Image: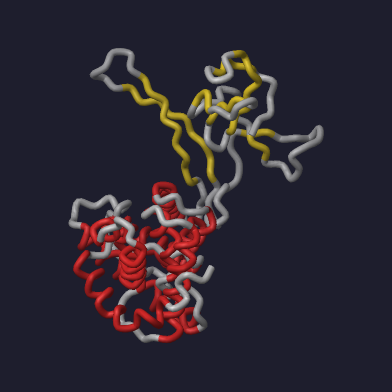
Amino acid sequence: MDDGNDQSYCKDCRLAVTVVVDHATGDTICTDCALVLEERYVDETFEWRTFSDSAGGEDRDPNHVGGRSDPFLTHAQLGTVVASAVNKRQSNATSLLRVHLDIGRESSSQENSLVVAFRAISDMAEQLHLVATIRDHAKEIFKKLDEAKLCPRGRNRDATYAACLHTACRKEGKPWTYAELATVVRDARADATKKKEIGRVAKIISEQLEEKARHAMGIGVVRAADYMGRFGSLLGMGKAEVRTAQRVAQSLDEQLDVRRNPESIAAAIIYMMAQRSGAKTSARDVSVVTNVAEVTIREACKELTKHIELLFSQELVV
């Protein structure tokens, strides 16, 4: 964020005020009342990047291009080419296309494939608002999958990228369901088909990339409690309610053996809590947020009701 001395008129303060520009979000913000005066600010100054070992000093070396910027691209030497394309049907219509080319001599096709994959994974992660650690972990998983020649064939690899994100989310203890990840898969097929494809690739990752050993140690194992934070937030639950739901789910894992997937258990616990508290949250509301069918939620609730005293005995303890 730039703490410059730029000034702009603030309609709330009704006077000219000093503003700052947050380059991470592109917002121009009033320093007096914190009102966002302008969104998606475009920085029209020269784009210089430093590729020398030190960012300061007299020998600072600014360049528009340099070595590879992605640590997962081991062989690529990236350059920038500016090419012009003229559309003959439009008079004097010229567009400049900035194309990043891989000019490395070794493994160029593989590196180009990784560049496309990493860009797609980054786009998906951005749409889902996933943190950088999950995004980068997904890239690492895809690279291992590609090097082992385990990537499914086909032009559309979105399901493969989504499966890599699914595995990365599990490892970071912030799991997402196949249904949630299917929303960012660009495919004309039905959602059920996309979920099935993501699950198929996720199984390949689990079985072929030595994931079983990590699961045996409890790393990456998804539990119902892991979903409570996100599901609860989307349904408007308070922090105390979310903590209670997490404790109920943990108690279930420790004391009972319920043969249902974690998202179904999470959805059932949330719906049961809503019923006990008198909230207006319906099974439909829970279904929309969790992507678990209403009938599945009701069946899971019916099963958990047998153990209601055990699960909710500490419900009110904060």
* Viewer can see residue 166: yes
Q: In this view, does 144 lie above or below 284?
A: below
The picture places residue 215, in percent across and down from the top left corner, at 46, 80
Location of residue 230 in the rendering, given as x and y in whole percent from the top left corner:
42, 58
Q: Which residue lies at the image location 36% right of the left edge and 59% below the top edge? A: 162
Q: Is residue 76 left or right of residue 300?
A: right
Q: Position of 165 compared to 280: left or right?
A: right
> Which part of the image, by quadrant, shows the N terminus?
top right
Res. 313 image quadrant = bottom left
In percent of width and height, residue 272 lies at: 32, 69
Q: Residue 136's spot in the image, x, y percent? A: 51, 57
Vertical position of residue 78 compared to residue 268: above or below: above
Comparing 86 with 123, the one in front is: 123
- Type of colouring: secondary structure
When the figure is inspected, residue 267 is found, relative to residue 3, above or below; the finding is below
**Which residue: 41% across, 30% down?**
97
Residue lying at 36% horizontally and 55% vertically, measured from the top left:
235
Residue depicted at 50% across the width and 52% down the height: 105
